Image: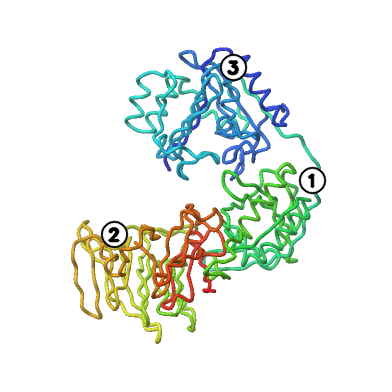
């Protein structure tokens, strides 16, 4: 993991005024001063991984910096640079109150950075990008500001020079020049309530409110090849890293139950469950009960929320206990997105999407062999294979690519170079094979194997009629391997260009939908998937694209999906069915209407 770091600077030496401005801001947002005390950091602690909105406790350390600057470190780490409840950045509000310039720098994993600069009038300018792209706590960063840079503030030349070398060097030099290295680890000290002897430290909390009595739900415990999964109320799935629902209807019933419990009004229009990252971990403190295991269920990352989950495996029940009454609306909102999704496009071409893979897995792929759906997903060192109309079976290796043609399906299977109880991974040079399966008989044939020179750990596959194309490398140089029922050829070249020629990309359509893997998608023999720039926001993919089906004969366009968050993967030969995914592990299939 690369370096992470955040720091906030104000161009003032009046620490008393800075301290008052911060205290006034906290008070305006409904927090009250509280003792700064030692606390145990939790596995997914909201003071470390959350925001000012999701954490009910804030801690700040401020002190004199260098060159006329004051320095502030906070927990949550980006606290003063985030937008407050009004939508205005807290950094700009404090800068205006003090009539001084301000700067916040957020380094993420050593490869991404956002700079937030505020003038003495409160005007704020963002530059850079985060690990999620050009967006910072819900605020989009203008395209002309995608390079992180200090433009409007006077800092030493050595800082600019260091940033030209790398983001890490720039951050380190900025901290050295404006604060000093002793400020480097202060934010982590604030999370734990540790002493910061050289700084003025303060702590604020949201006032305590009465909690609702715990909510009881049914519990089942399932064992799967990749671990244990809790099933709440018959269809809400909780494993070590994911919260999901068997379908949107089950998810909606659960969300309504939670909303009623928390007395939060909710309106749901079920689409497909979007799932959410989650962490289950022991709480820092809890009251122990015989026969009951208690965990913190943290849902979502930066903008998420959490419950206490009390599990009584012996009697098949569990209880949800709220951790913060201040977060009730957020709880319902996070659950609704994860378990219910959003319906879109009543006139969509493909509707009624149903989940294909129902067991926990980090990766799932699929294709159509004519009209037959074929899917594969990872288990530990193996891949499960599901051919419609045949029994489930396993193949050795992790399936990393798949392609289908009527009667046959091809898969790339890589032997993982790294496997442990929690993860598994592979590289370009790891041992790999290409197999072709006869979907009528189920027979599996190996057609290509990697060696010391020919590698395809990372690959793509595509059929051009009966010819299978494989993206590979020969001694590190890109090559295309074609396999035509026993005949093998290998040529240097661009696999994407080979695919464009193989799948007959129509040259008269300007707005074809394309991905890194595929230059276009046919939706049956006479239709293609296109990007509809004029479509409303509903029904867009996670990257913001609104997709439609274009009939090449009639030129009619229809919205592609009736649910938000789906990305098309493949269509049956007739175009009657569509396979789509929501993330890397969840596949759904819908029908043409």
Q: Which mark is residue 98?
A: 3
Q: Residues within 10 Å of mark 1 (few under 14, many from 20)?
A: few
Q: Tell which tag, 1 or 2, sits nearer the viewer.
A: 1
Q: Which residue is mark 1?
A: 211
50 lies above or below 448: above
Q: Which residue is mark 2?
A: 429
Q: CA distance from mark 1 to mark 2?
A: 55 Å
Q: Residue at x 23, y 65 (%)?
A: 480
345 or 216, which is in the foreground?
345
130 lies above or below 64: below
Q: Secondary structure at mark 2?
A: loop
Residue 159 located left or right of residue 278: left
Q: Quadrant of residue 466?
A: bottom left
Q: Are marks 1 and 2 in contact (CB under 8 Å)?
A: no
Measuring from the top left, give residue 574's x and y in whole percent.
43, 78
Q: Earlier in the sequence, mark 2 or mark 3?
A: 3
Viewport quadrant of the N terminus: top left
Task: State the colouring used for the structure image.
Answer: rainbow
Q: Are marks 3 and 1 in contact (CB under 8 Å)?
A: no
Q: Secondary structure at mark 1?
A: loop
Q: Residues within 10 Å of mark 3 (few under 14, many from 20)?
A: many
Q: CA distance from mark 2 to mark 3?
A: 57 Å
Residue 451 located left or right of residue 44: left
Q: Residues within 10 Å of mark 2 (few under 14, many from 20)?
A: some
Q: Earlier in the sequence, mark 3 or mark 1?
A: 3
Q: Tell which tag, 3 or 1, sits nearer the viewer.
A: 3
């Amino acid at each position: 993991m690369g370096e992470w770091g955040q720091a906030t600077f104000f161009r003032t030496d009046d620490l008393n005024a800075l301290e008052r401005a911060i205290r006034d801001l906290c008070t305006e947002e409904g927090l009250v001063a509280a003792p700064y005390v030692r606390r145990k950091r939790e596995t997914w602690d909201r003071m470390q991984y959350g925001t000012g909105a999701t954490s009910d406790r804030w801690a700040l350390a401020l002190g004199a910096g260098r060159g006329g600057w004051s320095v502030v470190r906070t927990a949550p780490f980006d606290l003063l640079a985030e937008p407050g409840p009004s939508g205005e950045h807290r950094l700009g509000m404090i800068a205006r109150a003090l009539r001084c310039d301000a700067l916040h720098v957020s380094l993420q994993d050593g490869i991404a950075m956002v700079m937030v600069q505020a003038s003495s009038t409160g005007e704020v300018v963002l530059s850079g990008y985060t690990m999620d792209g050009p967006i910072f706590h819900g605020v989009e960063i203008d395209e002309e500001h995608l390079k992180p840079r200090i433009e409007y503030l006077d800092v030493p030349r050595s800082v600019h020079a260091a940033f030209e070398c790398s983001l890490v060097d720039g951050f380190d030099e900025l901290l050295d020049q404006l604060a000093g290295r002793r400020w480097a680890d202060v934010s982590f000290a604030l999370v734990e309530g540790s002493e910061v002897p050289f700084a003025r430290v303060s702590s604020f909390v949201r006032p305590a409110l009465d909690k609702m009595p715990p909510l009881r739900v049914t519990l089942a415990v399932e064992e799967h090849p990749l671990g244990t999964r809790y099933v709440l109320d018959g269809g809400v799935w909780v494993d070590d890293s994911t919260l999901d629902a068997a379908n949107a209807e089950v998810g909606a019933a659960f969300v309504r139950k939670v909303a009623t419990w928390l007395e939060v009004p909710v309106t749901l229009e079920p689409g497909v469950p979007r799932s959410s990252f989650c962490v289950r971990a022991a709480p820092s403190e809890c009251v122990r009960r015989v026969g009951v295991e208690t965990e913190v269920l943290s849902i979502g990352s930066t903008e998420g929320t959490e419950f206490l989950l009390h599990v009584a495996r012996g009697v098949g029940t569990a209880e949800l206990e709220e951790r913060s009454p201040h977060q009730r609306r957020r709880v319902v909102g996070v659950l609704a997105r994860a378990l219910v999704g959003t319906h879109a496009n009543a006139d969509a071409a493909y509707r009624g999407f149903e989940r294909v893979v129902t067991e926990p897995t980090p990766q799932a792929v699929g294709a159509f062999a004519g009209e037959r759906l074929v899917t594969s997903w990872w288990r530990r060192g193996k891949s499960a294979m599901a051919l419609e109309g045949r029994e489930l079976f396993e193949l050795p290796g992790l399936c990393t690519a798949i392609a289908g043609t009527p009667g046959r399906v091809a898969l790339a299977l890589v032997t993982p170079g790294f496997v442990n109880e929690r993860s598994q991974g592979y590289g370009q040079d790891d041992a790999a094979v290409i197999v072709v399966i006869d979907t009528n008989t189920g027979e599996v044939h190996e057609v290509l194997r990697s060696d010391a020179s020919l590698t395809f750990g990372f690959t793509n596959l595509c059929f051009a009629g009966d010819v299978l194309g494989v993206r590979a490398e020969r001694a590190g140089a890109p090559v295309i391997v074609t396999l035509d029922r026993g005949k093998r050829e290998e040529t240097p070249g661009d696999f994407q260009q080979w695919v464009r020629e193989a799948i007959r990309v129509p040259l008269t359509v300007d707005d074809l939908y394309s991905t890194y893997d595929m230059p276009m998608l046919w939706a049956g023999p006479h239709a293609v998937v296109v990007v509809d720039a004029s479509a409303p926001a509903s029904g867009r993919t996670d990257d913001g694209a609104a997709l439609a089906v274009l009939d090449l004969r009639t030129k009619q366009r229809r919205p592609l999906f009736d649910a938000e968050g789906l990305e098309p993967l493949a269509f049956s030969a007739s175009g009657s069915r569509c396979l789509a995914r929501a993330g890397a592990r969840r596949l759904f299939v819908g029908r043409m209407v």
